[in-house]
Amino acid sequence: TSKISDKWVKKYHGTQLPSLNSCSIKFDGIITCLKDDASIASVILNSGLLECIKTNAFIVDHSTTSLDLVSTISNHPDILDKKISFFDAPVSGGEVGAINGLLSIMLGGPKKKLSKVKIVLEAYSKSITHIGPSGHGQLTKMVNQLCIASLVQGLSEGIALGKKSNLNMSKVLEAISGGAAQSWQMDNRFNTMVKGNFNFGFAVDLMIKDLKIALSQSKKLDINLSTSKSILKNYHKLSLCGDGNLDTSSLIKLLD
């Protein structure tokens, strides 16, 4: 929003443009991060943004998108004509990781310009892994989201059992967090889930979008991801109840 961007520009002495095609100079690279395929396609391909980028420049997209969109952008005539290197580079680490510059980046795209791109990304990430060619970043993010969804579901069920058994949940966390059950979700969401606080970043509606992308790909590969399908249904229930903006750990609400 303009309010957020105004605050950022003031804090970091940046520059804010009134529109995407109003630049007075041409850029060596552009970085995007938006909520869905339609937004990304609109901004990169249909906004005039490409007029603001040099020939042989790069575009890095941190959004979680479909493989079809990656292919559409990478092979778009305007992208090819200007010899722009497009990188699909979804991230993990949540809101906290973004604020603290500790994101993990899954990079797909050409090796050309990779070293130059990494220098830029290192400013706000703790790890950058070039997985492979175009699309491999998004495929890796699908794996990431499937794993996270299953972890949150398991954590929700474990906490629900512990609470309804009247266990001391602080001691439960102390006992299990040093063993095989330990995870980022446990370290960062266990206590907030116990307390019923769900205002910590990545939203239910975004997870629904990501799981749909992963399940669509699994269908193409003839893999039956039954657990992920069940979890997607649970997230749909939350969204239909008006909880689509809560963070993904709110899955536990269905077990209260």
Image: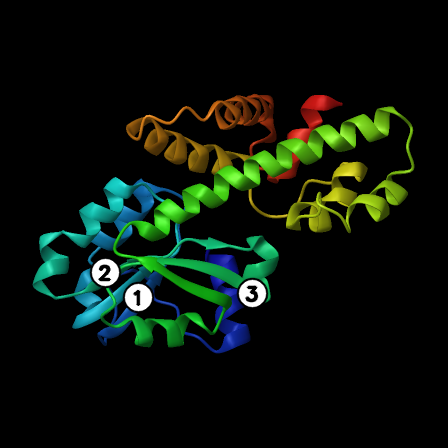
The location of residue 229, given as percent across then percent down, is: 48, 24
Q: Amino acid at mark 1?
A: Ile
Q: Is residue 103 left or right of residue 90?
A: right
Kindly tell me whether residue 64 is visible in this rendering. Answer: no
- Colour scheme of the picture: rainbow
153 is higher (above) or lower (below) than 92: above
Asked where in the image residue 58 lies, by quadrant, the reply is bottom left
Q: Amino acid at mark 3?
A: Leu
Q: Is residue 251 left or right of residue 8?
A: right
Few, some or many residues within 10 Å of mark 2 (<14, 14–19, 20+)? some
Q: Earlier in the sequence, mark 1 or mark 2?
A: 1
Few, some or many residues within 10 Å of mark 3 (<14, 14–19, 20+)? some
Query: Mark 3 — residue?
Result: 102
The location of residue 70, given as percent across then percent down, is: 25, 48
Asked where in the image residue 212 lies, by quadrant, the reply is top left
Callout in the foreground (3, 1): 3
Q: Earlier in the sequence, mark 3 or mark 1?
A: 1
Query: Mark 1 — residue?
Result: 30
Mark number, residue 49: 2
Q: Residue at x 19, y 46 (%)?
A: 72
Badges 1 and 2: C-beta atoms under 8 Å apart?
Answer: yes
Callout in the foreground (3, 2): 3
In the image, 35 versus 235, the foreground residue is 235
In the image, 152 versus 79, the foreground residue is 152
Q: Residue at x 28, y 70 (%)?
A: 29
Q: Amino acid at mark 2?
A: Leu
The location of residue 128, given as percent across then percent down, is: 44, 65
The location of residue 245, given as percent across then percent down, is: 57, 37
Determine the CA span between mark 3 and mark 1: 20 Å
94 is higher (above) or lower (below) than 146: below
Q: Secondary structure at mark 1?
A: strand
